[in-house]
């Protein structure tokens, strides 16, 4: 099942509103038998034909008219199997797994089409399967290759860019149900071997309970799976100290390739200089090159932290302070910027013990022994003062740290609630720019949002330059306007030598930005690798590659095509 964000009690009031918002726009077709197809097709009629032309689908009917089906075509001709092929594939997979582990249940399929954080167009897979072993995955992929049925790997379902939607139907391979075990922890070597579906929080809790004293420090959405994390190239607030998924946190990847072969990219040794790094090939590949089944992770000592909160007159003052904090070697784990709008929202919701000054504010976690943190606090006070800080609050134990961090942790829910909209919808985005360009970038985003009357408080993982304009929409009608706004943010970020995505990845929604960001040469390399490993194009189609037939993205008028198959 998809991991759902669990709200602290204080935010529960906002929850039904978020859910209602999604229900109002999320209407994927729920065909579970062929009988439901006919009226749907008739009803959609000409509109669909037009849509297919637009998004690269082709209505296909054999010349003798013996079987009528819709299948997906690419430029070269027919690409995926016909409806019958999908049926045969699912029947063969049923023979491989226990009954409960192959589902064509409508609710199950819909849960695997999108999560509540992604409002864009989405499409359920034809079936959801829950393998137990790498060999199960291998057998599933072989069947799918035989019938040219898409395979959509799935971890915890917290990704934000339509990553696991199934625009052409297919088999969603969910590793979170059974393939979530810790295989071995080598405390002496500082690594753990895990099955790919384990959530990082589950892993870290187990390490803490086992008294290992080590943890896996990447921290994206709630209990994201390690395979999802490596596949999206994730990071989070801890990136300042520990880097992103692209640092060497993933040592080995065991994966099933699109032809069903199994590869292990490396041994367990921490270093290896044997050729290009094949582990890295899977980082950020978004399930398009294979299904990751096992991972060897590097672990690191878990150190105590204390929270400090410092308010500044402007984003520029805050950025300059962070540059000094980092360059003077103050021992910190994270530095998060919440702009004045966010602080207003947090104060309004009462999630900080005493209201904070409604100014651009930095949230730090200092780390180390008590003596180290005392020294860091001294340095931080000095630097903050030099950069005209307005106020600094410092926690001196875990309880005080939690209380102060609550504003950062609850920022999104505070903004949703403070927007005052009846059914607020979040439009997430995560451009990233060099730190020196961050004040200019933030100022321009704020200016544009103000001009358009958009409520969009800003939170930034400030030291690495990732900026989230937390755009809260009144309703779905605002999507086209916000689409344009975000396009403009991304253009600015790229012009500033930045990227369309600092951490969420590309998915279905950002592949259009890749040519301008990476250039034709690099996009061509991406495509060459994809075609070499996945000549049938069955692995998570419609994502990442700019020259894929255009899978549905943020289009308010888009209606999903009928699924490529039924049960
Ligand atoms: C509230 C919230 C906060 C978030 N904050 C952050 C943040 O701070 N930083 C950040 O980076 N992200 C953040 N995210 C996004 C999300 O948590 C990350 O993208 C995460 O890495 C996704 O992991 P997952 O297991 O949920 O992957 P899924 O959503 O299940 O899948 C993501 C992608 O990985 C592929 N994949 C999954 N499993 C496999 C596998 N076994 N083999 C091959 N491919 C696979 C899928 O096909 C898909 O393309 C946030 C999300 C939420 C909801």
Image (cartoon, rainbow, N blue to C red):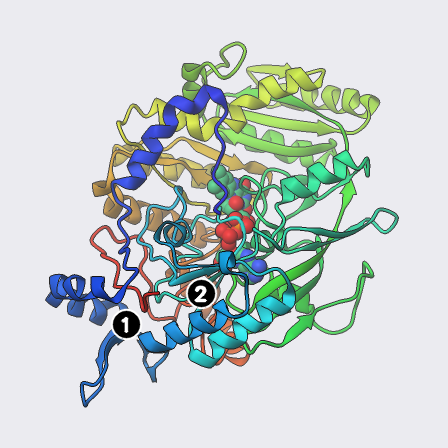
How many neighbours does mark 1 have within 10 angstroms: few (below 14), some (14-19), or many (20 or more)?
some
As rendered, which of 29 and 529 lies closer to the eye?
29
| Of pointers 2 and 1, the one earlier in the residue sequence | 1
Residue ID at (61%, 29%): 321
Q: Position of residue 64 (x, y in %)?
A: 18, 90
| Image spot of residue 356 (x, y percent) | 50, 14
Query: In the figure, 497 relative to 224: above or below?
Result: below
Point out which mark residue 171 bears.
Answer: 2
Q: Does any portion of residue 196 appear in the rendered image?
A: yes
Q: State the residue lying farthest toward the top.
A: 354
Q: Position of residue 506 (x, y in %)?
A: 45, 57
Quarter where residue 517 is shown: bottom left
Instruction: Find out if the beta carbon at label 1 lies less than 8 Å from the nearest ligand 1 atom.
Output: no
Residue 414, by quadrant, is top left
| Residue identifier under label 1 | 56
- What residue sits 67% from the left and 69% below the top? 278
Decide which of 199, 117 is in the foreground and name it.
199
Task: Kindly state the secondary structure of the residue where label 1 is placed.
Answer: loop
Q: Residue at x 51, y 74 (%)?
A: 530
x%, y% of residue 319? 56, 33
Q: Is residue 146 left or right of residue 376?
A: left
The residue at the far bottom in this view is 64
Which secondary structure, mark 2? strand
Foreground mark, 2 or 1, reads 2
| Quadrant occupied by the C terminus | bottom left
Asked whether the residues under the numbered discs 2 and 1 touch, taking CB atoms below 8 Å apart as contact, a structural biologist would say no
Left or right of 15 on screen, residue 254: right
Can you say whether 478 is above or below 127 in the image? above
Residue 435 appears left or right of 307 = left
Q: Is mark 2 within 8 Å of ligand 1?
A: no
């Amino acid at each position: 099942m998809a991991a759902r964000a669990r709200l602290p009690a204080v935010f529960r009031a906002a929850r039904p509103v978020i859910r209602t918002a999604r229900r109002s726009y999320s209407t994927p077709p729920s065909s579970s038998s062929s009988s439901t197809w006919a009226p749907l097709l008739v009803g959609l009629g000409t509109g669909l034909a037009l849509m297919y032309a637009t998004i690269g689908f082709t209505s296909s009917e054999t010349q003798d008219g013996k079987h009528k089906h819709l299948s997906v075509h690419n430029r070269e001709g027919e690409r995926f199997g016909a409806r019958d092929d999908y049926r045969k594939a699912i029947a063969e997979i049923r023979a491989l797994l226990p009954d409960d582990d192959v589902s064509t249940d409508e609710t199950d399929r819909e849960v695997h089409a999108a999560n509540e954080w992604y409002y864009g167009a989405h499409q359920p897979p034809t079936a959801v399967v829950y393998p137990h072993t790498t060999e199960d995955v291998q057998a599933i992929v072989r069947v799918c290759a035989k019938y040219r049925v898409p395979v959509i790997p799935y971890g915890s379902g917290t990704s934000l860019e339509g990553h696991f939607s199934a625009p052409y139907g297919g088999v969603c391979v969910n590793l979170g149900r059974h393939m979530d075990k810790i295989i071995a922890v080598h405390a002496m070597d500082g690594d753990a071997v895990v099955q790919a579906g384990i959530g990082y929080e589950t892993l870290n809790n187990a390490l803490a309970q086992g008294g290992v004293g080590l943890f896996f420090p990447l921290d994206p959405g709630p209990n994201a799976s390690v395979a999802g994390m490596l596949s999206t190239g994730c990071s989070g607030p801890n990136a300042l100290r520990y880097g992103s998924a692209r640092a060497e946190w993933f040592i080995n990847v065991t994966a099933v390739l699109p032809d069903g072969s199994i590869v292990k990219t490396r041994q367990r040794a921490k270093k290896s200089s044997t050729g290009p790094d094949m582990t890295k090939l899977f980082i950020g590949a978004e399930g398009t090159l294979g299904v990751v089944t096992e991972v060897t992770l590097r672990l690191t000592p878990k150190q105590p932290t204390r929270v400090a909160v410092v308010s500044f007159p402007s984003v520029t003052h805050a950025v300059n302070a962070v540059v000094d904090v980092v360059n003077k070697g103050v021992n910190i784990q994270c530095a998060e910027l919440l702009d004045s709008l966010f602080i207003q929202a947090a104060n309004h919701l009462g999630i900080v013990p005493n209201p904070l000054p409604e100014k651009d504010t930095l949230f730090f976690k200092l780390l180390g022994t008590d003596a180290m943190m005392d020294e860091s606090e001294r340095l931080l006070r000095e630097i903050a003062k030099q950069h005209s800080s307005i106020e600094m609050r410092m926690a001196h134990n875990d309880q005080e740290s939690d209380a102060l961090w609550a504003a950062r942790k609850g920022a999104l829910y505070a903004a949703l609630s403070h927007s005052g909209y009846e059914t607020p919808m979040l439009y997430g985005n995560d451009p990233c720019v060099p730190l020196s360009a961050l004040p200019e970038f933030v100022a321009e985003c704020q200016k544009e949002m103000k001009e358009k009357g958009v409520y969009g408080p800003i939170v930034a993982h400030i030291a690495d330059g990732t900026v989230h304009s937390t755009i809260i929409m009144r309703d779905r009608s605002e999507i086209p306007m916000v689409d344009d706004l975000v396009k403009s943010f991304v253009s600015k970020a790229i012009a500033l030598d930045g990227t369309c995505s600092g951490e969420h990845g590309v998915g279905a929604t950002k592949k259009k930005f890749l040519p301008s960001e990476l250039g034709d040469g690099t996009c061509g390399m991406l495509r060459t690798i994809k075609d070499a490993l996945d000549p049938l194009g069955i692995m998570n189609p419609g994502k990442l590659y700019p020259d894929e037939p255009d899978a549905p993205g943020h289009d308010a008028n888009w209606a999903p095509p009928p699924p490529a198959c039924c049960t």
